[in-house]
Image: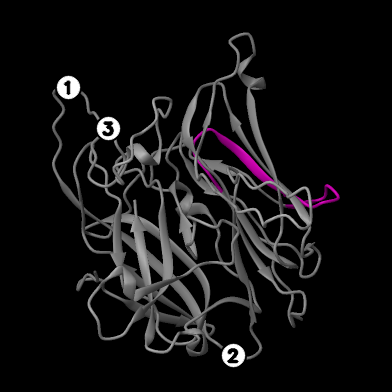
Amino acid sequence: MVDPSSQSQVKEENGVKSAVFRSPTIMLEPGSVSNKYYNNIDFPKGHIAVKSFVAEVVDEAGNSVPLYETYLHHWVVVRYYYRKGVGFNQSNFIVKRNSGICDEGLPQYFGLGSETRKTITYVPDPYGIEVGNPVEVPPGYEERWCDLYNVTKDENDRVIELDYIGGLRCCYDETRCRVKDGFYGSRRNLYLKYTVKYIDWVASLVPVKIYILDITDAWKKPEKSTATVARHHCQIEYLVESCAASVANVDCTHTKKISITFPSGGDIIYGTAHQHTGGTGMALHGEDGHVICSSLPIYGEGKEPGNEAGYIVGMSSCYPIPGSIKISEGETVTLLSNYSNAQRHTGVMGLFYLLVAEPSSKPNSILSLY
């Protein structure tokens, strides 16, 4: 669905265009959950290079809404191809996934959570996320975009295990959280405001591939080279148990670690992580142990939107000098996710978002460090 009040505003500065859009109305009241799928959302047209995609929750007047009023667990934007001239049906669209690594889930091109306001997402020159290339669109289809905004059974009618005590499967669309007895609040109309910065595609631009690594990936390297290729089963979320009562809180750190083989090589252009409250950072290491990229959470200290105390309001990003940090095809990399486990945390995440340029790419300008 596309909201007729989306109010696209396009500006241009130094050759970079900026378009501002707004999602359809999201009606919420205290305790309610919204996890909507909006198909064919407004998005810049043509063959372009996306330079950044940022979003936040706003009210009807366009004011930023703080996390303690409406918590933003996640928003994701998925690219897909849709058969022309037909009504909406699942058989008529093809999801254009990112480059990996999960075989199921996490297909998005863009997506953040509570950290959305203070996480830098700009793709430096001369790189860009290439979209809208007509050569890539199957005959009879057109490119579109979908936005996903975020009990005894989950939304797919699957029984929730007894030891599952909190997470995404409990908070699907139109579920309700308990509020204090006697508390009554009014409904309000909210929106996901998103800003896309982009430039028209030209031959001098270098395309990047999007990879999303998940700390819950259950992939195991086959013992024999002739074995069936192992699939990447990404569980998306996990449980962090509290540390022993005898351990001082400052020493309580839960570390989850996985090793995976990277499917293709290239230069690391950008990286950032996604964690929930309690997270203390993530890091990706190469096969020889060197740090490829690390990302640390920024916790708020006040009340204003973007600085809400106790919430993760941003994640640091890494921008290596061009050609200085590489991943080789088939290299075994190690991903670590750290959480404070001074208390138990349910349904947490540890995702790592990477932009990688193919090694044959030869950038013709110097990147800035952020």
> Residue 222 placed where, x, y %?
73, 50
Spatial CA span between label 2 and label 1? 59 Å
Going from N to C along the chain, the mark reached first, 1 or 3, is 3
Residue 181's label in the rendered image is 1
The x, y position of residue 254, in whole percent, is: 63, 29
| Position of 279 relative to 334 (above/below) | above
Q: Which mark is residue 141?
A: none
Q: Nearer the viewer, residue 14 or 292?
A: 292
Asked if residue 42 can be seen in this view, the reply is no
User: 150 or 134: which is nearer to us?
Assistant: 134
**Is the Cβ of the residue at disc 1 closer than 8 Å to that at disc 3?**
no
Magenta residue span: 274-292
Up/down of 227 relative to 44, above or below: above
Q: At 22% across and 45% down in the image, what residue appears?
A: 174
| Disc 1 element | loop
The residue located at (50%, 86%) in the rendering is 133
Label number found at residue 202: 2
* Earlier sequence position, callout 2 versus callout 1: 1
> Residue 83 location in percent, x, y?
33, 81
Q: Which color scheme is applied?
A: one colour
Q: Mark 3 near mark 2, Cβ–Cβ under 8 Å?
A: no
